[in-house]
Amino acid sequence: MLTKTKAIVLRKLKYGERKMIVDMLTESHGRVSVVMAIPSTQRGKLKKQYFQPMTVLDVELDLRPRQELHHLRDVRLDVPFSSIPFDAAKLSITLFLAEFLYYATRGEQLNPQLFAYVEASLRWLDGCSALFANFHLVFMMRLTRFIGFFPFLDDYHDGDVFDLRAGTFVSSAPLHTDFLSVADAARINTIMRMNYESMHLFHMSHNDRNRIVDVVIHYYRLHVPNFPELRSLDVMKELWV
């Protein structure tokens, strides 16, 4: 079945000598993996730069039932980023988030709200000129709203801990060990109060950001099966001083 849809590139892997597998988040079918010939020149339709992580494309896919790998029939750039490919900090953020999304959405089926959130977030980052150090933190926590384990925030009080399994703030430690200390619970509450426009108003140290990244990834590991260590995390942690 030929399908035209928007797609966001998450990962590409070499497959044999002349092919590669590209994993995409699509607007119409959720996660899709395609196999294609590696572009040998810049003259053809399938240009190498189209398949950099987090590139937003318009694609035509040949989707076959019960097949894991599908075929890409046509592609063009949907969102030509003006700053992300040329800004080292933004590029590092998008490479980290591409790896993060690859694992966070592996079982994702049709979810146009999730796709719209990711696309709008990328557009915002590309258009932002400064003060985006907290972007990845806000992105990761707000993504939980679209994949089913957004924390319940209304009951937060100073001195609460955060039950990672239940996604709620509680006044005393639960009977299991998957909970955050009072200090880390306060950090999570702060992150959940942020959006892209307001996040620059919340001062955070380098250590604060790195601690929150660890906490958020641990939260995902509890709710997303087989969520691994992220190879790009160490690079991400070195970004902000």
Image (spheres, grey):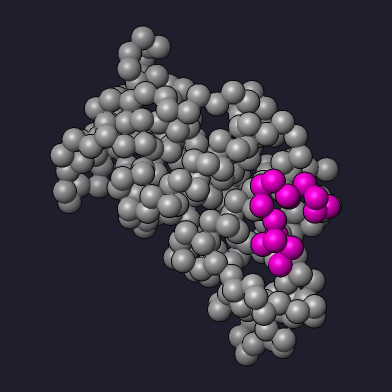
- The answer to whether 39 is drawn above or below residue 167 in the figure is above
Q: Which residues are magenta?
A: 189-203
Q: Residue furthest top?
A: 43
Pick the front one: 200 or 223: 200
Q: How many marks?
A: 0
Q: Is residue 143 rendered to the left or right of residue 59?
A: right
Question: Dividing the picture into quarters, in which one does residue 209 lie?
Answer: bottom right
Residue 219 point in image, percent of width and height: 59, 67
Q: Which residue lies at the image location 59% right of the left edge and 23% below the top edge? A: 82
Residue 47 in picture, x, y percent from top left:
39, 19
Task: Name the residue rendered at 32%, 31% in the picture.
Answer: 59
Q: Residue at x 70, y 65 (%)?
A: 188
Q: Position of residue 133 (x, y in %)?
A: 74, 44
Q: Is residue 95 visible?
A: no
- Residue 213 coordinates in the image, percent (x, y): 67, 56
Please state if 149 lies on the left or on the right of 41 as rendered.
right
Asked whether residue 200 appears in the rendered view, the answer is yes
- Quadrant placement of the C terminus: top right
Q: In what quadrant of the picture does the N terminus appear?
A: top left
User: Along the line of sight, which residue is nearer the eye, 197 or 81?
Assistant: 197
Magenta stretch contains residue 136: no
**Image vertical order of residue 148 relative to residue 87, above or below:** below
Residue found at x 40% / y 31%: 57
